[in-house]
Image (cartoon, helix red, strand yellow):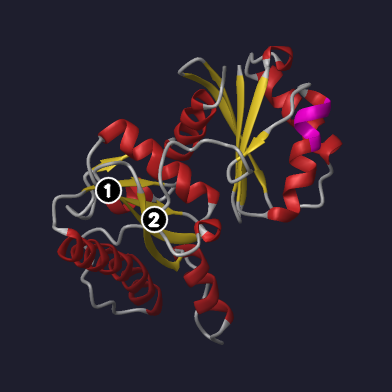
Amino acid sequence: MLLAIDCGNTNIVFAVFDGEVLRGQWRAATKTDKTADEFGIWLTQVMQHDGVAAANIDAAIIASVVPARNFDLGKLCEKYFKCKPRFIGEPGLDLGAEIKIDNPREVGADRVVNVIAAHAQFEGPSIVIDFGTATTFDVVDAAGAYCGGVIAPGINLSMEALHMATALLPRIPVKHPGNAPVVGTSTIAAMTSGVFWGYIGLIEGLVARIKAERGGNLKVIATGGLAPLFAEATKAIDHINGDLTLRGLLAVHRRNSP
């Protein structure tokens, strides 16, 4: 079985694949002082709780955008699962996709595997929107090559900045305003509307501009925890796949396995 690890700026997602079947996934905070041993004890316990035997793990692959966590994640795999992990971006790893940007080393590992999974699942040119700490829009062409993208502040990051930089605006949850008017008649209503409809405007505006620039016939795939919330409010998103990053890691592992 394969241990796939997606280390983002906010969360680390650990997932186990048995062939094509996703047996389970578990989350931990990225900004933590946990050592490899602390991660290992926690992960083997939650895996056991869900009926996944750690002894059956025979390979691991990691997509990380937080270099400071790489050492502990690598040690975790070696000590507790007896396998040396592959890292997206390491020399010699065949991604099966051309990276068509000025400096291929600049692109985040999660964004690379997202477009690999999107092309494998949907074929043809597409835009992948990932609602993470940053909201990213990544373009894959008809041949499966990564062609670049757009990076915007994530919605939670924007809301936290709004609260921290103002004296009177509170923290609010991200939610659909429902049938409430766009123009709010209270501070909370105004913020809820601005955050939600402002991001819908961001999504629709950037998708339209990318399609106009690249020819228009692109599928739009959304991933990340907030993808369903926004997808239900706009026709700009064609598909939702919450496991896109993990599926991309699985695809790269299969490509590089004997």
Looking at the rendered structure, the kind of residue marked 2 is Lys
How many discs mark residues in the rendered view? Answer: 2
Mark 1 vs mark 2, CA separation in Å: 10 Å
Residue 16 seen in the current view:
yes
Quarter occupied by the C terminus = top right
Comes first in the chain, label 1 or label 2: 2
Query: Residue 33's x, y, as percent?
Result: 82, 52
Identity of the residue drawn at 38% across and 74% down: 191
Give the labeled residue for mark 1.
141
Bounds of the magenta span?
Answer: 75-79
Instruction: For the residues labelled 1 and 2, say whether their Cβ atoms are less than 8 Å apart.
Output: yes
User: Mostly what secondary structure, the magenta segment?
Assistant: helix
Give the labeled residue for mark 2.
100
Query: Residue 87's x, y, as percent?
Result: 64, 40
Q: Secondary structure at mark 1?
A: loop
Circle on res. 184: none
